[in-house]
Amino acid sequence: MPHLVEPTRVRRWLPRRVLVMKAASELPHTAEVLRRATEAGVTEIDVVGRVSAPKGASERETYAWAKSTLALVVAPPSARKPQPIPPSADWRIDLARGCPAHCQYCYLAGSLSGPPVTRVFANLDEVLAPIAELAGQGTVTSGTAARGHEGTTFELSCYTDPLGIEHVTGSLAAAIQRVGTGRYGPEASLRFTTKFDDVEELAGLDHGGRTRARFSVNAAEVAARFDGGTAPMPGRLRALATLAAAGYPVGLTVAPVMPVDGWREAYGQLLDDVRIALAPVAAAGRPVDLTVEVITHRFTPGSRDVLLSWYPKTKLEMDESARSQKRSKFGGVKYVYPRDTMRELRSWFETEVPARLPGTPLLYLT
């Protein structure tokens, strides 16, 4: 039986406080963020010289403070320099760094230092400017036979969930409209991934079909156990269908895949639920442009330590002895599933994605 049910409300995160760095206080986008935050009900708004947790706070208190804080900062040149981001997109553009969710496998735990405050970049014009400069360049989609029709792609969700904070930032909508109306040239397109479902504003934007909205989804057991503070899976699928009906290219980021007991049935049910959610869109005569990306669970020694400090009672499997080491070109170590497990997962998804979602390309499994 399908698991899909209609949710009663969308999931919105509301920060308890907004801290504005002095350098960001006079920027135009700051005024828009503060307008949205005030309308959403945030009452604690302060201009500060630095973003820091209260003195004397314990590790758990610091974590709770950080996860309820949104900071408006100025992205330095180093953070505005786009980097290649295979296999997802040609380039990475960061609207913010940090995420309000409480996912117990959070990959940002090993990528961002310090307390997990969500830092929004107030100098939005400077952040988005490289899109025009890099249009037509890249090696992941630009000029490729398989994905060249996507143009030059820019990933917006490497270090944040842009939809999870959108109702108090407006950054994602601004980027979508600018690219959709051709402000940065005819070759640029955007991509973002989210675990949230508040898409009403996005559905009404002039997006030009040039932003692929991907929803991070998982087997019901995995999502229920480890995806804290996010929209429930039915809400994400409803949002997926809403944006598909509004003409967006859409996608699934199935992540992080875990070979839990009964994983074949669980992930099969997930793919079936996606088909059920999108069926009314296709039935209404709206072509659905859907892709699938699959990312298996992995961790680093550093991220494992951080996650265990954040979630000391987690049941997430992070047993190094049960994993294989994968080294980066810079010498970093990740712990991934053993080769036989990866081969089995790959074979299953390569068979079941086209079988359950006909015509949907599986872009990659990593």
Image: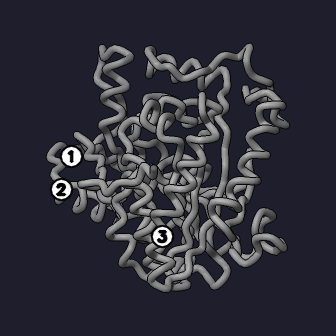
Label 3 residue SS: helix
Expressed as whole percent of the image width and height from the top left, the position of residue 150 reads 69, 74
- Residue density around tag 1, few if under 14, some if 14–19, many if 20 or more, within 10 Å: some
Mark 1 or 3 closer to N-term? 1
Q: Left of 50 or right of it: where is 179?
A: right
Residue at 82%, 74% (x, y): give it.
Answer: 143
Q: Which residue is mark 1?
A: 45
Q: Left of 272 or right of it: where is 20?
A: left
Residue at 50%, 19% (x, y): give it.
Answer: 315
Kind of residue at disc 1: Ile
Q: Which mark is residue 38?
A: 2
The residue mark sitting in front, 1 or 3, is 3
Residue at 60%, 48% (x, y): give it.
Answer: 268
Q: Is residue 309 visible?
A: yes
Q: Work out how far the residue at label 1 is from the one at label 3, CA to CA, in angstroms.
A: 25 Å
Q: Which residue is mark 3?
A: 175
Expressed as whole percent of the image width and height from the top left, the position of residue 235 reads 37, 54
Identify which residue, 104 or 55, lies in the foreground.
104
Residue at 36%, 78% (x, y): give it.
Answer: 204
Mark 1 or 2 closer to N-term? 2
> Label 2 near label 1: C-beta < 8 Å?
yes
Q: Work out how far the residue at label 3 is from the one at label 2, CA to CA, in angstroms.
A: 22 Å
Kind of residue at disc 3: Ala
Expressed as whole percent of the image width and height from the top left, the position of residue 278 reads 49, 68
Q: Quadrant of residue 19?
A: top left
